[in-house]
Image: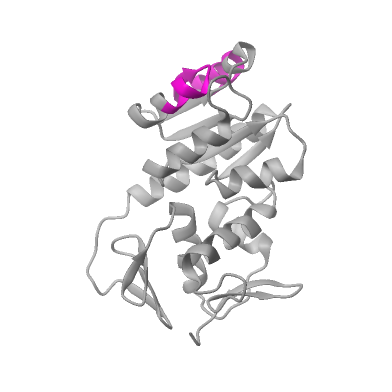
Amino acid sequence: MGKTVLVVDDEKTIVDILTFNLQREGYNVLCAYDGKDGLDRALSGQPDLILLDVMLPYLNGFDVCSEIRKQDKLTPIIMLTAREEERDKIFGLELGADDYIIKPFSIKELLARVKTNIRRMSSMDDISPGSDDEQLKVGSITVDTARLRVIKNGKAVDLTQREYELVKYMALSAGKVFSREELMAGVWNYDYFGDIRLVDVAVRRLREKLENDPGNPEYIITKRGAGYYLNTET
């Protein structure tokens, strides 16, 4: 059965264009034209990916994203926005969106990002539960690859799928400094497109959940001018 993409946008022309191109690529498409209906379909329709406009009737895209993430931490969300303000882009990512695309956008680029995010989630679905020994230990942090979770001091940390993948990727080479471009390629699977600010926002969100004092991190350390690394001495 083909993967399903939910398109939430109040501009019918855009919905029609996206529907045509997504269906041509083999995806099933669900459509919603306002935030309330989009939220209902996101939670009841179990889409594999959500394309979510920011400016929507009844509930804006930011509110929809926030509500989805309260119940669904896995489904990839790509925000569609005509806004150019930096704070709007970052705000969506901080609410749990996986990416954003600025209107007007290239259909080729949008389809590439849809494919990348769905492939990422499909690869996670293909992982079968393993033994309790399938763990990566870095100081007081444990990445439980059998149950797809991160444990700190014996307690599971409430992470989104992307945040889990970021910790796991860094834990596989703990102590190594990763550039933002390396993390984009390794975690987001974006080799030739994507905004490296995605990495900075993800790290900031992760620190808020993982660190005792996010302003003075002990686990995910910034190497000025180079990138980030997972501290092995915690």
Say above or below: 139 vs 33. below
Image quadrant for the N terminus?
A: top left
Say above or below: 182 vs 153. above
Residue 125 vs residue 45, the one in the foreground: 45
Numbered-mark total:
0
Say above or below: 23 vs 65. above
State the image coordinates of residue 165 (x, y, percent, origin top left): 46, 59
In-image side of 58 versus 197 (left or right): left
State the image coordinates of residue 220 (x, y, percent, origin top left): 56, 73
User: Which residue is painted at 63% across and 31% down in the image?
Assistant: 80
Q: Residue 76 magenta-drawn?
A: no
In-image side of 153 versus 51 (left or right): left
User: Which residue is painted at 57% across and 52% down in the image?
Assistant: 189
State the image coordinates of residue 74 (x, y, percent, origin top left): 41, 46
Say above or below: 166 vs 13. below
In-image side of 184 versus 102 (left or right): left
| Farthest-out residue, bottom | 233
Residue 86 vs residue 105, the one in the foreground: 86
- Magenta span covers which residues? 16-39
User: Which residue is painted at 57% across and 21% down in the image?
Assistant: 9
User: Which residue is painted at 60% across and 47% down in the image?
Assistant: 93
Q: Is residue 70 visible?
A: yes
Coloration mode:
one colour
State the image coordinates of residue 212 (x, y, percent, origin top left): 49, 74
Q: Residue 34 magenta-drawn?
A: yes
- Examine the image and state in which quarter residue 44 appears: top left
Q: Is residue 46 visible?
A: no
